[in-house]
Amino acid sequence: METSFTAAALDPYAERITSGVATLGGILMLPTLFLYLSGLLSEGIAQTGAVVTVAVALGLAVWLALNYAIQPIAYVVTSDALIIRRRWARALRIPFKQIAGVSLAGALADVPRFGLRRSFNAGVFGYHGPFYLDPYGRVFFAATHRERLVAVARYDAPSLIISPARPRDFVEALREALLKSASDGGKAMPAQDQKASFLLQIAGSSILLSLQCVLLIDNPADCDRIHALT
């Protein structure tokens, strides 16, 4: 059984950045077009300038196309994995056994204005790729809207930050799927009687996500009490 959640529409910041990059690429093409129409493109200096501006414009076009291709369009919760479907690129699949927990991440709504140290793409058709945030460290974004962020903590990889259109419903659905998968045979958790500890540090005034918890495989009630803290 699959439950699909549509990705949130681009937030105003991402819309401005995307339209700004596209407009800049168009403006860079205007001098070359003018030189061509005026018959001056055969001049040596003009040719050099045209090559430079066209190269930059093409680079921006490639950057736009790349980020459009990897823009998430849906987050799908299956019986054993979270799948991120993208426009043109291959879908990302995160098995439940790699997921430590999930919660809302409203404290990151100010990214990239505050706390951003490094990023792959902070605004063009969304927020994609590895980010380094102060004070949270490394995370991986596959999001489109900063005010609908959800954090998915992973055991052996940076936390995944996504943005379903209905974040609360998504969190509830993924938590239920994780618990069901664990109760059906421990597929999403370590072996019976092993403890899996995790630390979620996507914390802020809007959520309580500084959690250091230990989940017992044979006691789902403990998981419910921990989830209630969020």
Image (cartoon, grey):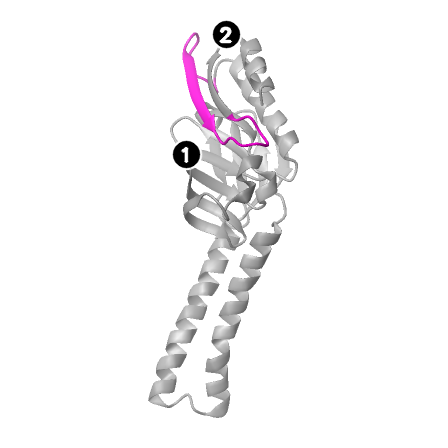
The amino acid on which the numbered mark 1 sits, given as a three-letter code, is: Pro
Which residue appears at 50% of the width and 7% of the height?
A: 218
Q: In this view, does 182 lie to the left or right of 131?
A: right
Q: Where's residue 49, x and y in %?
A: 38, 80
For residue 56, above or below residue 42: above
- Quickly name the residue at label 2: 218
Q: Quadrant of residue 60?
A: bottom left
Q: Is residue 171 above or below residue 212?
A: below
The question of residue 113 being in magenta is answered with no
Q: Distance between the residues labelled 1 and 2?
A: 27 Å
Of badges 1 and 2, nearer the viewer stands 1
User: What residue range appears in magenta?
Assistant: 187-209
Helix, strand or loop at disc 2? Answer: loop
Q: Which residue lies furthest to the bottom in this view?
A: 39
Q: Where is residue 106 in the image (x, y as percent from the top left)?
A: 58, 36
Q: Is residue 188 magenta?
A: yes
Q: Quarter holding the N terminus?
A: top right
Which is more N-terminal, label 2 or label 1?
1
Per the rendering, the mark at residue 158 is 1
Q: Which mark is residue 104?
A: none
In the image: residue 44, left or right of residue 62: left
Q: Nearer the viewer, residue 151 or 229?
A: 229
Dividing the picture into quadrants, the one containing residue 42 is: bottom left
Q: Which amino acid does label 2 sit on?
A: Asp
Number of numbered discs present?
2
